[in-house]
Amino acid sequence: MMDVTKIRQDFPIYQKHPNLKYLDSAASALKVQTVVDAIDRYYTTLGVNVHRGAYDLAYEATKLYEDARSTVAAFIGASPDEIIFTRGTTSSLNMVANAYRDILKPGDEIITTELEHHSSILPWMKVAQKTGAKLIYIPLTVEGRITVESFEKVLSKRTRVVVITHVSNAMGYLTPAAEIIRLAHQHQAVVVLDGAQAVPHMSVDVKALDADYYAFSGHKMFGPSGVGVLYGKVKLLNTLEPFEFGGEMVDQVFKDSFTYKDAPLRFEAGTPVISGAIGLAAAIDYIRSIGYEKMHEHTHRLHQYTLLKLKSLPGITLYNPTADQAIITFNVDGIHPHDIATMLDQDQVNVRAGHHCAQLVNQFLGVTATLRASFQIYNSIEDCDAFIQAVIVARDFFQAF
Ligand SMILES: Cc1ncc(COP(=O)(O)O)c(C=O)c1O
C-alpha cells in the first residue's frame, strides 16, 4: 500500500486543506509541487518566447519547450514531431475533426459511441452536419461497454473515421482499443482516441496501439490546466489543414498565398503554451517516479474497498460496479445528485455531480444526472470511509423529508 502521508507532501494543497477528501480527480487532478516549481522556474528565470529570439535566453526557453515535447513523446511511445501542444483534450480533438471537414464526403461514416465526452463527439457532429457524413453509434452492451463484436457490427467499407474514448470518464470502462484499431485499419479508416482519462492512470504506447490520433490533457495528470497534447502519425499530420494561422506555423508568405511548416509547428500558430508544456513534462517525470503499477495498485484497492461498502448500503443505485478504472458512478435514490454533492462538501468530501459532459451516457442510463467519485494516489482509506459516512448522513437527511 502506498504511503499516502508521504505522497501528500508532494501536493501543496494539503497544507492549506489538511482534511480535504478529494474524490474528483477524473475532473482535474490535484497539482504536484514539482510542476508548480518547474513553471515558477521558467517564469522567474526565463519568461521569454520560443523559436524566435537570437539570444541566449530565447535558446534556453526553446530548449526547455522542445525538451518537454521529447518527454511527452517518449512517455507515449511517439517521436517529437508527432506531438502537438494544445490547450487540452478539447482543442486537440477539435483540431483533428476540423481538418476532416475538408476530407469527408457525403455518405462517409464516422463511428463513435454514446460513452463519449462532449469534446469527443460534438466536433464530429459538426463535421457530419457540414460534410454530409453520417455518425454511426456502436451499440453498447447492457452494462454500457464497447466491445469488439459490437464495433464489427457497424464497421463497413464506408467507415472513414472512428472516434472513441480510451477510458470512459462517466463509467470508467476501458475500450478494447488495439483490436478496434486493427479492424478499422483493415477498412482504411483512421482512429482518433480520447485518452483524457487513460493517460493519468495507465501506460499508453501509441505505436503499440497503432492509434492514428491520440489526445489528452495536462490538468488530469497532476499537471497544469491550459495545456494538452495531440499525437498524430506524422504522415497523417502533414496532410491536414491547420486549424489556426499565424506566426511560426508558416513557412513562406507571398501576397496572395503561403506555405506551412511541417508538423508539429504547423499546428502551433502563435506563441505556444510554453509554461504549460514545461509543467506537463514535470508531471510526467512525477508519474514516472511513482510508476503506473504502484498507482494502479493503490487506486484499485481504494476503488474495491469503497465499492464493497457502497454496495451494502440500501437506497443507492450503482451504475458501473465493474468499472476498470477507479471511478464510481451512482445515485442516492430519489435525491438529486447536486443536493448530495453539496452536503458531502460540508465534510470536505468533494465529488462530481451532473452529466459529466457526457449527456449521452445519462440518456443510456435513463437518468438526468449522477454522482461520481474518482480516486488518485493521494486518496486514503480514511477518505473512502469519510465519503461513505457522508453519503449515509446525506441519504438519511434527505430521505427524512
Ligand atoms: C474522457 C474525456 N475527454 C475529454 C475531456 C475534456 O478535457 P479538457 O476539458 O481538458 O479539454 C475530458 C474532461 O473531463 C474527459 O474526461
Image (cartoon, helix red, strand yellow):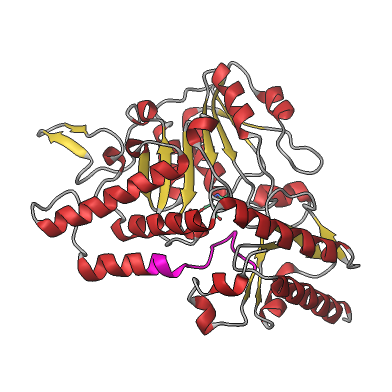
Q: Is residue 353 above or below residue 210?
A: below
Residue depicted at x 71% and y 48%: 324
Compared to residue 254, the image places residue 45 above or below, namely below
Which quadrant holds the C terminus? bottom right
Q: Which residues are magenta?
A: 23-36
Would residue 286 be found to the left or right of residue 141 on screen? left
The residue at 31%/60% (across/down) is 275
Q: Position of residue 369 (x, y in %)?
A: 72, 60
Q: Is 343 displayed left or right of 309 in the figure? A: left
Horizontal and vertical percent for residue 38?
Answer: 34, 65
Residue 228: x and y in percent read 42, 51
In the rendered image, residue 237 lying in the magenta stretch gets the answer no
Residue 267, image quadrant: top left
Looking at this view, is 240 or 227 the one in front? Answer: 227
Q: Report if residue 364 is visible in the image.
A: yes
Q: Quadrant of residue 39?
A: bottom left
- Quadrant in the picture for the N terminus: bottom right
Residue occupying image coordinates x 64% and y 22%: 155
Q: Is residue 158 above or below residue 362?
A: above
* Front residue of 74 and 262: 74
- Inspect this view and state whether residue 271 appears: no
Count numbered badges in the picture. 0
Quarter of the image holding residue 45?
bottom left
Q: Give the dominant element type of the magenta stretch: helix, strand or loop.
A: loop
